[in-house]
Image (cartoon, grey):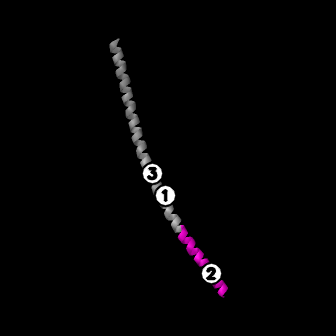
Amino acid sequence: MSDDLEKTFSQELSRLERRIDELVAVTTQLKDENRSLKQRQDTLIADRATMLQKNEQVRARVEAMVGRLKAMEHGS
């Protein structure tokens, strides 16, 4: 009976070791994915800031052109 119990214990221990190895692998994968997603988010935030700045510059230029056109219209 002791040999059966020892064998069962050993099998259960091996099963738990495999499960822990699987969980470590999944954790590593999720950490890598999380790091990648954070980098992508940082890039997108920077891209958005750049686009907003360019959009503001274009808006200011268009407003200036409209102002000049109105001034030309009133001057004629």
> On the image, numbered disc 3 is attached to which residue?
38
- Location of residue 25 in the rendering, given as x and y in whole percent from the top left corner: 39, 38
Q: Earlier in the sequence, mark 1 or mark 3?
A: 3
Q: Is residue 69 magenta?
A: yes
Position of 63 compared to 31: left or right?
Answer: right
Q: Secondary structure at mark 2?
A: helix
The quarter of the image holding the C terminus is bottom right
Q: Earlier in the sequence, mark 2 or mark 1?
A: 1
- Location of residue 32 in the rendering, given as x and y in whole percent from the top left corner: 40, 46
Position of 42 compared to 5: left or right?
Answer: right
Asked which quadrant contains residue 16, the reply is top left
Which residue is drawn at the image coordinates 34% and 22% (left, top)?
10
The quarter of the image holding the N terminus is top left
Which residue is drawn at the image coordinates 53% and 71% (left, top)?
57
Vertical side of 39 occupied by 30: above or below? above
Amino acid carrying label 3: it is Lys
**Label placed on residue 45:** 1
Q: What range of the chain is rendered magenta?
A: 55-76
Mark 3 crowd level (few <14, some 14–19, many ≥20, 10 Å Cα): few
Mark 2 crowd level (few <14, some 14–19, many ≥20, 10 Å Cα): few
- Location of residue 12 in the rendering, given as x and y in whole percent from the top left corner: 38, 23
Q: Secondary structure at mark 1?
A: helix
Q: Earlier in the sequence, mark 2 or mark 3?
A: 3
Amino acid carrying label 2: it is Leu
Residue sitting nearer the eye, 60 or 20: 60
